[in-house]
Image (tube, helix red, strand yellow):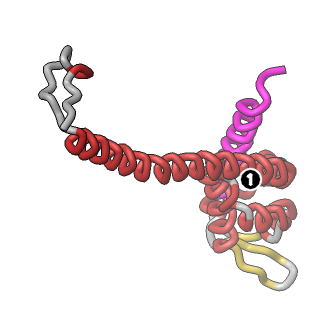
Amino acid sequence: MAYTCWQFDLLSWPCLTQAEWAAWFQAISSVVAIIVALAIPAFQWRMARREKARDDEAVTAATAAQMLPHIQDIGRTLTQIINGEGPKLGSTPSGPIGPEASALINHKSVDILSASLRSLGPVRNTASKVVFNIYRAREIVETNGSTVETWSNRKFYGRLQAAQTATAQTLDQIDKLFSDHIGDM
């Protein structure tokens, strides 16, 4: 049997036979194969996760762009209500609400926003506050014929005030979302 000691003299390896070299080579190759077998799925999983995150960002941006006019419309309506009706009617304990607040009760933009909350990503929390407060304000009103009344004007207009604050925060987050994607021009 031939010994091949000359290759590893510097490393102080013992002299190995051809069969021992083959066994070492096979063992090292097996370890490398196991490492590769574990690394490839981990790499593929990480790439799939990054791709999903990019897709989620794109869906969030697209949904935010679609929802922007609705959120702005809700914000304008809430501002008109708070500045116009709120001071007058918010001080009364109960009774009829103004025409703008009555229009907000069945405002289609609120329902459209509610249906799109899942796709809004990081904007979802503040947009949920808008929808939640308007829905809670809806629970406070009662329709008596052609008149829409509340059992607590203070709570009703308080909910609308909270929705207005959340609307402003939502619009700020959408602006930030797009400024992060586009940059300052």
Where disc 1 sits, the SS reads helix
Give the residue drawn at x 52%, y 52%. Answer: 45
What percent of the width, then of the height, locates residue 69?
87, 50
In the orientation shown, which residue stands out farthest toward the bottom? 145
- Closer to us: 34 or 104: 34
Q: Taking 56 as reference, is 136 above or below it? A: below
Q: Quadrant of residue 160?
A: bottom right
Residue 168 appears in the picture as rendered:
yes
- 28 left or right of 126? left
Which quadrant, please, contains the N terminus?
A: top left
Q: Which residues are magenta?
A: 156-185
Q: Is residue 50 magenta?
A: no
Dominant secondary structure, magenta: helix
Q: Taking 171 as reference, is 113 above or below it? A: below
Residue 91 appears in the picture as rendered:
no
Mark 1 highlights which residue?
59
What percent of the width, then of the height, locates residue 20?
20, 42
Identity, as a three-letter code, of the amino acid under mark 1: Val
Q: Is residue 162 magenta?
A: yes
Q: Quadrant of residue 115?
A: bottom right
